[in-house]
Image (spheres, grey):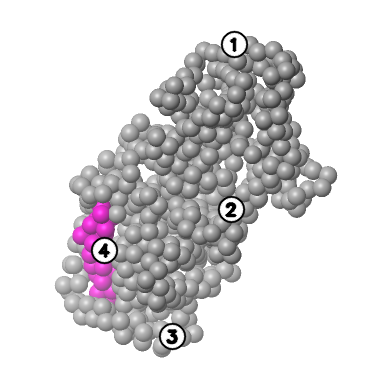
Amino acid sequence: MQKSPGKATAPLLLGALGVVFGDIGTSPIYAFGLAFDADGPFRPERAEILGTLSLIIWALILVVCVKYVLLILRVDNNGEGGILALMARAQRGLPAYSRYARLVVPLGLLGAAFFLADSTITPAISVMSAVEGIEILAPRLEPFVVPLSAIILLSLFAIQYQGTARVGALFGPVMGIWFVVLAGLGVTSILAHPEVLQAFDPRFAMKLLQTHQTIGLTILGVVVLSVTGVEALYADMGHFGRPAIRVAWFLLVFPALLLNYLGQGALLLGNPKAAEHTFFSLAPDYLLLPLVFLATFATIIASQAVISGAFSISRQAVQLGYLPRLHIRHTSSEATGQIYVPRVNWLLLAAVLVLVTSFGSSADLADAYGIAVSGTMLVTLILASIVFWQARPQAHIRIAMGALLFFVIDTAFFSATLTRLPHGGYLPILLSIVLYVTMMTWKKGREHITAAKRRDPLPVEEFIAGLAKGRATRVPGTAIFMARAGEGLPRTLLHNLKHNKVLHERVVLMAIYISDEPRISHAERANIEDLGYGFYRVVLHFGFMEEPNVPAALGLLDQKGFTFEELSTSYFVGRVSFVPAQRPKLSRWRERIFIALSRNAQSAVDYFHLPVPRVVELGVQEEI
């Protein structure tokens, strides 16, 4: 895997348009109009139109431009972005047992849970909001919105196994056309009512909140929809690079969004009756059908970006030890970030279809939208502030002031979205809680198992010393057993010796460590230590963004004079069955969750790419 690109080349700019900005780029379809539709907080009066526009404009400037594009993108983990990469960097810079370090992991996992919850809502609301454009063409087609949305989403998830490599070349140009269309529609409307440009004055935003204090949080709950998808700017930094994302944002995406929102406001100033479908009403009748098709395609691309993000964050969680091993399929021989995780894909599809059929419209889905997004934004701010605080001790006052400003903004948005809890907002909260509990349970369970092995180790040194007395018959070949340093002799080795009464000439105790850095250089990948009497300890290191290919990593030891002959090397792997302990270290309900997760984990053989004909599996039972 290559490091994050350092230049904004044309291919990277197109790729960023197609993946990074799909979600935030389709927000104009529904974000502004929800403030003035039949169920919105306002009637389309001049003060309310300009005030809402002013709030959206300054949300884009402060939250997206300043906070994310100019500041958060600077906080990378060796070129990688995303909530778990940020968590790993913040954790690395803190003392292991400090009280702040103990808060970093729960915060990071909570942010990851919010992100995954958002991944279920974004495809549903994006596709439905685009398909609803057919209601303008033919109101009698309204009953077909939900079935058609479900068919589009089902088709989208069904082709995920092919990866984005085949259609990725189309994503950038299509989104480029989309942003040009957004800008063009907006400019035409602005020219008809140029007074809408007064919305750049922040006093309209402040006056709106002052005169509507009782529904202030409701207003902010609508405004936050205009910045949904902002987390993708940070999450996809490792693939496209900071320069490409910044250039694409400021050169095309940001101006197009501003012009379109202003155009919608100008339209309502001249025609308040257009409030029901503000976005689609910008287009003349002869362009409406092409706009519906383009919007649908754009929302599919936006959904694809979120689904791919869910795959990526799931892989990071597995690598960092917060989820059991999942089957991960690489869909491109060139782009390592293009992966397919079947179990995550079908779980997402099930959740998305439930949302589409139960809510029935994008307006109703908006009540459940925004909570997960604003929660992720708040967690990202806290973790980024920790990293900035560590890296710039001479600027603590400025960091504290900036963090406080954005903390007030993010807290206001998060509080605003919480007002939707009774109207469907509880769904992303419940989903986030389930995901958070799942990841924390797996983490705590693995910690207890590791601690138990370290408390009662079978000393490797004593066992090797006993071999000098000729207690075991040695046979030709190499045997590799999984064994971390400090955990003693692996049980799989003892089971093999007990049943087969022999040891191989070369016995390798292999430990695999996943670093909190995204990538490890080949020079640091594999180390070997001679323990004597034909025993060796091999330690392999992988970054949390890398694929743990054990045979490939072992091949690097050729340079150190230690060669593994494939036909004479056997891998002994334990098929572990966890059972409840008489004195459980976890609560009973966590214990059941952990055991269920372990039973559904991918086998170590597939996950570490071990050659199946050379693998020997031995049953091992452990208490939890």
Asked if the residue under mark 2 is in contact with the one under mark 1, i.e. CB atoms within 8 Å, the reply is no
Res 346 seen here: no
Q: Residue at x 37, y 71 (%)?
A: 394
Q: Label 2 belongs to which residue? A: 435
The spot of residue 14 in percent (x, y) is 24, 48
Q: CA distance from mark 3 to mark 4?
A: 28 Å
Judged from the image, the secondary structure of the residue bearing numbered disc 4 is helix
* Alpha carbon separation for disc pair 1 and 4: 66 Å
Instruction: Check disc 2 and give the amino acid type.
Output: Leu
Ranked by sequence position, the earlier of labels 2 and 4 is 4
Q: Main secondary structure of the magenta part?
A: helix
Mark whose residue sits in front, 3 or 4? 4
Q: Amino acid at mark 1?
A: Pro
Q: Which residue is mark 1?
A: 476
Circle 3/circle 2 CB separation < 8 Å: no
- Assess whether residue 262 is covered by the magenta stretch: yes
Residue hosting label 3: 212
The disc at residue 254 is 4
> Disc 1 and disc 3: Cα gap in Å?
82 Å
Give the mark nearest the N terminus, 1 or 4: 4
In the image as oriented, which residue stretches furthest toward the bottom?
211
